[in-house]
Each structure stands twice: as C-alpha cells, then as structure tokens.
Image: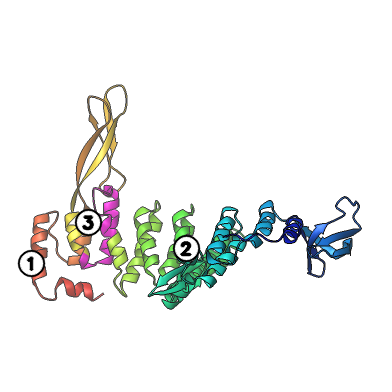
Amino acid sequence: MRILAPLAVVVLLASAASAEVFVLADGGRVTGSLLNPQESPRKQYVIQAADGVKITLDAAQVRKVLRPRPDEAEYERIAPTYADTAAAQWELAQWCLEHKLIVQRQVHLRRVIELEPNHAAARHALGYSRVNGQWVTQKEAMTAQGFVRSGGKWMLPQEVELAENKRKLDTDQQEWCQKLKRWRGWLGSNRDQEARDNIASVNDPMAVKGLTLGLRNDQNAQARVLFVAALGRIDAPEAARAMAIASVCDVDEEVRLTCLDQLQDLSQTKRRPEVISYYVSKLNPKKSTNDIVNLAALGLGRMKDPSAIPALIEALVTTHKFKVQKAGGDGATSASFGRGPNGGGTGMSTGGGTQYIYRTFNNQAVLDALVATTGVNFGFDKQAWWHWYKAQKKKPDSLDARRDSK
C-alpha cells in the first residue's frame, strides 16, 4: 500500500524533481534548482536548495552541473510515497528495474530483505542462493568451496596458478619470437655473424615456439638449418616433433637431413615417442603419398625403435591412389607418381575424363628401416616378416628389452 505525502511535502518534492546537482571545485555538492538559467556569460549560480534556502555561488566555484534523467527525477518524486514495508519496497524496486535505475533498485531490494529476511524474490535478485537452509551470496558460496575471484571468473587456486604460469609462458615465448625475428633480420647484413652466434647459443625451451615458426615459414633454407641446429640443442618434445615434421615436409633436402641428424643424436640419450608416433602416422598409404611414406621410413631407420616394427612391416608394400587427367585431344592421360625414392612418371590411355588409378610400390626406405632396426632381412615378404616378428614377441626380453633400453 502506498502512503501519500502531505501537500507541503508533495510541493517540495515536485520542485526537487527538476533539481540539479552542482559539483563544486572543492569536491562538495549542492542539490537544487537553478534560478538564473538564462545568464550568459555566467558569473554566478543562484540556486534554490531543496530545503528552500537560496544559495549564490561564483561561477569559478562550480566545476560542473549534473542534470538528472527524467526517470531519475520521477523516482525522486515518487519514492517517498511508498510505505516502508517489504511489499511496497519490492514494488518500488520493480519500478526501478523497469526504468533501468540499477543503483536505486539495489537500495530497495536490500530494504526488502531487512524487513522480510526470507523474501525469496528479493534474495535472488540480489544474487543470493539458499544453501543448507541459509541465504548466501555467490561470493560467500564460492569462497566456502575454496574458489577465488581472478580475471572476472571464479577459479580454484590451482587454476589461478596454472593460468598465471600460462600467461608467463606466453610472455616468455613471445619475447623469444621477437628476439629470433630480430636476429633473422640481421642475417646477410653487417651483423650476420652476430646473428649466427646468437642463434647458435639458444638452448632455452621457451624459444621452441619461435624456432618452430622460423623452421616452418622462413623461405631461406640456410636460415632453416640454423633453426634446426638450435632445436637440436633443446631437450623438449615440442622441439623433437618440430624437427620430425620438417624431416618429412621440408622441400629442401639439406634441411630434412639436418633434422634427421639431430633426431638421431637425440635418440641416443632416450626414446622419443613423440617422434616415433609422428613417423608411424605418416606410413598410412590412405593418408600419405608414397614419397611421404618413404621419408617417414627414413626417420624411423635413424631412430631404430622396435615399437615401429609392426607399422614398418605393414608399410613394406603400399598401394596409392592417383588422379589422372586427359592431357590433350588424342585422348591420352597422365599421372605423376611423385618425386620420392620409388617415384617417377607414367602415362596411360583412356576414353576421356578424370579417372583414378592405383599403383603398388615396394618401399625400399621402409625395408632399410626394418633391417636397421631388427638386424634381419626378409625383403618385401610381409608374411615372412610377420612370422619372424610374432616369434620374437614370444621370446622373453627380446623386442621389449631393446625398446626399453633407450
């Protein structure tokens, strides 16, 4: 129920409805109505305060004038007409919500729960939840569960630590990217030797990202060789995997061979499962060209890891699919079978249009990798290889011992 104010109060509120706030140079504030709005240039502010007192201020005393929105003025007019009960204060809070007066709404919501502590709608509007029979704010509930506020989110302390570590990691990696980019720019200039010396001194794992980007994107093969040498000095899975990828995908043979040399050296100290798994994935003829199969096998031959033996046996002989297209008006078509160890061109005749053909390869690089890893040679006879491999698996401490010794 709303209680109307006496006539004198209503008149006073009506005048206050259009009140302005005069922010003073010393930080103070005066609320009232400006009685000389037309004065120009302004020398004074003549203000009728809400209590009826007239105040005159020099223009230099007033820093700025704040004029309320119409909804704020209306709020000032109607707020005193609502009773100090939970129901009336809730009604006024809802009015504030409709008119986007957020601060004022919070005041009345808090008054509602002061008057009626279990007013569920007001509690929820203020962000409370009922937990074990008690009204608690989100902050209270989350804090009780061990969460802390960080970056605008509720997180466990461990998550905060991980996020901070990641932020530091990103910062350190970015600094190395900038350094490497700067040194790369010196190559071929009067600071060429300084750049080479700097890159040759890199051994920080934080530099792996920058070195990997250089290895992947730099157009100069000699610069890529420098990056490979730096990656080879860093004992990190990401560095080894970056070199494995380049040993298969780089267009320059020197870069590929340098990667293989580095990986072979690294494999002497411990197994490199991230490298083995990458090479094995490239032996699949459904996903890789015959060139890629053989380049991956070259890497496995350097690593000599017994865990790759089954995949190598399966890749001894592979069949690949090629698209052939009509080359001219005579109906001839051609297909390229690649640039790798077993590559070469071929041609065929067809009745016209695009076709797909299949070709089977004996992969010498795969056989070489098997021989290097096992010490035996059954040629391209998959059945003989599988028979031997299954027999070895039955022997105690045979293949597993060789794999675990690295």
Q: What stretch is highlighted in magenta?
A: 279-307
Q: Is residue 398 above or below residue 250?
A: below
Q: Mark 1 — residue? A: 391
Q: Is residue 131 visible to us here?
A: yes
In which quadrant of the rendered view does residue 9 lie?
bottom right
Q: In which quarter of the image is the N terminus?
A: bottom right
| Residue nearest the viewer, comparing 45 with 182 | 45
Q: Mark 2 — residue? A: 121
* Marks 3 and 1, the one that precedes in the sequence: 3
Q: Residues within 10 Å of mark 3 (few under 14, many from 20)?
A: many
Q: What is the spatial separation of the Cα atoms under label 3 and label 1, in whole angstroms? A: 21 Å
* Residue pictured at 30% horizontal, 74% vertical: 270
* Marks 2 and 1, the one that precedes in the sequence: 2
Disc assigned to residue 366: 3
Q: In which quarter of the image is the C terminus?
A: bottom left
Q: What is the spatial separation of the Cα atoms under label 2 and label 3, in whole angstroms? A: 73 Å
* Residue pictured at 90% horizontal, 52% vertical: 39
Image location (x, y in percent) of residue 59: 88, 61
Pointers 3 and 1 in contact (C-beta within 8 Å): no
Residue 195 falls within the magenta-colored stretch: no
* Residue pictured at 17% horizontal, 66% vertical: 374
Image location (x, y in percent) of residue 2: 60, 59
